[in-house]
Image (tube, rainbow, N blue to C red):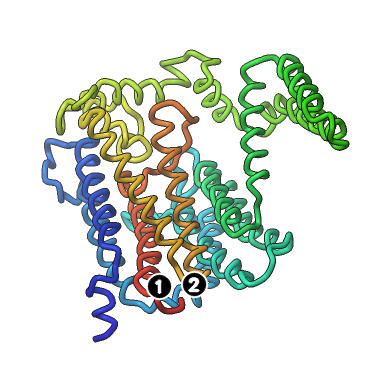
């Protein structure tokens, strides 16, 4: 009886639950619009993707309720087992998985296709939270960081074997967890950002032009801080390191990245203008979103969507349907809902009294932010196209269920934050 009062007596962050439900319903209607079939106009027809999505939403509601009933300490105790199960599934998908679009990422179970990589995010977040929280009273050290990194690298390697680059990249977002817990400095994150900028600039301009600019900047820095004994040696080391990085970009670009990945980057950077070939997906996506203008064309009125000009329009490119039928206003509302959800997640993470719940909360925030930013960014052409879903909007039972579990386990921790999880 006491547990029931904890669940339904107002201790749950109901605003977060409302945002989650709103996004699920909005996604359901947009999937209906994206793959509308006049022969099966019912929103709950199980012979269609939108009917199946309705069923997935019902299952997620039931799972969410079950998560809120189970004692929060259970998720800490069971985290190693969940992590192990997801690794077994990641190995199994390489053996018995179904290849779709060049990725062997799904295990067929009747009419349902299980995507283990989605649940690997949950297992990794829980185990990482358990491990880092067990060292929360100690000074952050390289050994702890190394073990935490290995926890993430194992699923990354298995997912890359599928190969599913998009899902694998999601795990790198968890570096924000290490930053929050003091294992990674802000300087290191800034260094990584500078490397990304240098990588892009080297692809756009001559490497010798970039090296010349770096030499000028290092010389200017050495001159401005000439009173410091370390100024000149530091400038020289920085210049040598950055020069070596710039000189290695072409090799890495040609020999490490796959051809389709290079093509997508070339399209984003404007090095290739191929609207009917490599740039087709992005071009159709931008046309669909732009055609919605301010208020959109109206529900079920999207021509780009209706006539299948937009690729993967119910999964990776679901935001195109929002832009075309709901317009700029509708798109802004969706973005605001996501920002609101992220802020609530971060707020919940910060107010946890348990280090396990706090670390887990930041893991959830990192994964959600990566999916929100990359998915929406690729549809409007600011990041390369990689196949990851938009949480709660994209079609798919595995992604919807895994995102729901990620969120509601945090909600469970938050509802019991006065205790110890």
| Residue in the picture at 61% in, 25% down | 200
Picture coordinates of residue 336, whole percent (x, y): 31, 41
Q: Is residue 50 above or below residue 347?
A: above
| Residue in the picture at 60% in, 73% down | 134
Judge by depth and name the residue closer to the eye, 33 or 93.
33
Q: Earlier in the sequence, mark 1 or mark 2?
A: 2
Q: Quadrant of residue 277?
A: top left
In the visual, does 51 lie left or right of 310?
left
Please give the residue where the numbered disc 1 appears in the rendered image: 417
Disc number placed over residue 354 in the picture, else none:
2
How far is the residue under mark 1 from the one under mark 2? 7 Å
- Check if mark 1's residue and mark 2's residue have beta carbons within 8 Å: yes
Which quarter of the figure is the N terminus placed in?
bottom left
Q: In this view, does 101 lie above or below 65?
A: above
Picture coordinates of residue 2, whole percent (x, y): 27, 85
Q: Is residue 49 in view from this perspective?
A: no
Picture coordinates of residue 7, whole percent (x, y): 27, 74
In the visual, does 368 lie left or right of 334?
right
Q: Is residue 115 in view from this perspective?
A: yes
| Residue in the picture at 22% in, 60% down | 58
Picture coordinates of residue 226, whole percent (x, y): 83, 29
Question: Are there few (<14), some (14-19), or many (20+) residues within 10 Å of tag 2?
Answer: many
């Amino acid at each position: 009886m006491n547990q029931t009062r904890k669940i339904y007596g107002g201790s749950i962050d109901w605003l977060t639950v409302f945002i989650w439900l709103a996004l699920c319903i909005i996604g359901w209607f947009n999937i209906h619009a994206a793959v509308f079939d006049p022969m099966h106009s019912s929103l709950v027809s199980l012979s269609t993707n939108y009917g199946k999505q309705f069923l997935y939403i019902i299952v997620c509601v039931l799972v969410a309720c079950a998560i809120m009933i189970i004692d929060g300490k259970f998720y800490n105790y069971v985290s190693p087992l969940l992590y192990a199960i997801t690794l077994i599934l990641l190995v199994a998908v390489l053996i018995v998985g179904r290849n779709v679009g060049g990725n062997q990422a799904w295990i067929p179970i009747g009419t349902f296709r299980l995507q283990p990589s989605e649940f690997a995010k949950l297992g990794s977040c829980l185990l990482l939270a358990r491990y880092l929280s067990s060292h929360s009273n100690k000074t952050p050290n390289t050994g702890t960081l190394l073990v935490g990194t290995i926890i993430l690298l194992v699923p990354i390697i298995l997912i890359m074997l599928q190969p599913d680059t998009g899902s694998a990249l999601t795990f790198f977002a968890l570096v924000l967890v290490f930053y929050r817990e003091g294992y990674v400095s802000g300087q290191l994150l800034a260094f990584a950002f500078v490397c990304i900028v240098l990588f892009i600039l080297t692809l756009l301009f001559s490497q010798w032009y970039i090296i010349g600019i770096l030499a000028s900047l290092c010389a200017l820095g050495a001159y401005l801080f000439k009173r410091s004994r370390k100024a000149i040696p530091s400038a020289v080391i920085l210049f040598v390191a950055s020069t070596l990085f710039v000189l290695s970009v072409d090799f890495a670009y040609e020999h490490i990245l796959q051809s389709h990945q290079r093509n997508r980057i070339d399209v984003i950077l404007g090095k290739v203008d191929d609207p009917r070939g490599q740039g087709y997906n992005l071009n159709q996506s931008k046309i669909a979103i732009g055609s919605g203008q301010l208020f959109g064309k109206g529900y079920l009125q999207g021509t780009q969507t209706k006539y299948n000009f937009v690729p993967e329009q119910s999964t990776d490119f679901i935001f195109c349907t929002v832009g075309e039928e709901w317009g700029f206003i509708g798109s802004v509302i969706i973005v605001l809902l996501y920002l609101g959800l992220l802020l609530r997640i971060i707020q919940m993470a910060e107010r946890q009294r348990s280090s396990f719940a706090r670390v887990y909360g930041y893991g959830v925030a990192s994964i959600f932010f990566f999916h929100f930013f990359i998915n929406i960014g690729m549809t409007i052409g600011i990041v390369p196209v990689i196949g990851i879903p938009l949480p709660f909007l994209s079609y798919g039972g595995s992604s919807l269920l895994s995102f729901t579990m990620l969120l509601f386990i945090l909600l469970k921790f938050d509802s019991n934050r006065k205790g110890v999880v």
